[in-house]
Amino acid sequence: MDLERQFWNASPEELKRGYGTYPEQGGHRCLVCGEFAEFGRVFPIGEHWYDAEAYMKRHIAAAHKSMFEYLLSLDKKWTGLTDVQREVLQLFYEGRSDADTAKTLGSKPATVRYHRFHLREKEKQAKVFLALMALLDERPKANASAGDNDQEEFVPIHRTATTIDERYAMTAEENEKVLKTYFPYGLEGPLKEFPSKEKRKIAVLRHLMTRFERNRIYSEKEVNAVLKDAFSDYVTLRRYMIEYGFMDRKDDGSEYWAKGEAMHG
């Protein structure tokens, strides 16, 4: 199961702690970067050794600071929060009083209290919605028709997508057909052509990202080398990687990384 799918399939409790436990894989995996800690092993941090779960907790803190800040940093299309609400939540997380928060925001304490009230209302709505979706998932077991079990699974959307629209509504079957069409010599082989349709572009780019390592900084020359193996017009591929939020880079183009997965400095 890929990292994006694990992230979106995670429970609220798993998102809160930042890692999932996967008995079939034999360990815990960080939902942010994919770091894996195998059951039964001990891991060194400084002068101390930790079991898999204790190591994963320390990894989250060291590599991602806190899951609160990571989740809050996600685009508003995922959090449903306005910029002001995100700032208010950050200040609340830091333990600021209403008066101090109001001063920082340049507003009145009454306005901050309204934000606090509104955020609690959003929390209630989220709980009800999660319950509804859970009940919907359970329905086929009890009273749904056989046809309802034929619903196709959608390919997970990468967390750093720049715009979410109908282009991303692609089932696993559709995705497989696109890849077979554009990679006729196998998924590790060259790209036949770069598609003109946006939906197909996303499928191709998403697959090409599997050729890059997570948590690694690439030079432009290294990125070009990886993409050139897939397609002669590697410049176009690189441009779309950035445009669609699969990769990011420094302003001077000296460093590239898988967006949302690699640390950069």
Image (cartoon, rainbow, N blue to C red):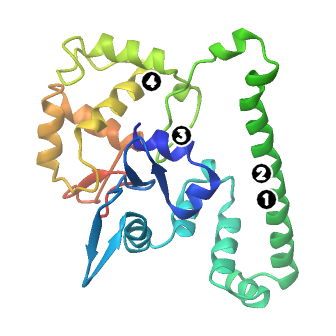
Q: Specify which label sits upstream in the sequence, 4 or 3.
A: 3
Kind of residue at disc 2:
Ala
- Sequence-wise first label, 1 or 3: 1
Q: Label 4's element? A: helix
Residue that mark 1 sits on = 123
Circle 3 SS class: loop
Q: Is mark 1 on a helix, strand or loop?
A: helix
Are the two marked residues, 1 and 2, in contact with CB atoms closer than 8 angstroms? yes
Looking at the rendered image, the disc whose residue lies closer to the viewer, 3 or 2, is 2
Q: Nearer the viewer, mark 1 or mark 4?
A: 1
Q: Distance between the residues labelled 1 and 3?
A: 25 Å
Q: Where is residue 118 in the image (x, y as percent from the top left)?
A: 84, 64
The disc labelled 4 sits on which kind of residue? Glu
> For the residue carrying disc 4, how many other residues have a C-alpha within 10 Å: few (<14), some (14-19), or many (20+)?
few
- Of the residues shown, which amino acid type is indicated by label 1? Glu
The reply to whether residue 265 is in sight is no
Q: Choose the circle earlier in sequence order: 3 or 2.
A: 2
* Residue with the mark numbered 4: 198
**Nearest to N terminus: mark 4 or mark 2:** 2
Q: In the rendered structure, which amino acid carries the disc numbered 3?
A: Thr
- What residue occupies the far front of the structure in this picture? 40
Q: Is residue 154 above or below residue 63?
A: above
Residue that numbered label 2 is attached to: 126
Q: Nearer the viewer, residue 66 or 92?
A: 66
Query: Would you say the residues marked 1 and 4 are in contact, meaning their CB atoms lie under 8 Å apart?
Result: no
Kindly identify which residue carries mark 3: 163
Decide: is 36 above or below 58.
Answer: above
Image marks 1 and 3: residues in contact by CB distance under 8 Å: no
Q: Are marks 4 and 3 in contact (CB under 8 Å)?
A: no
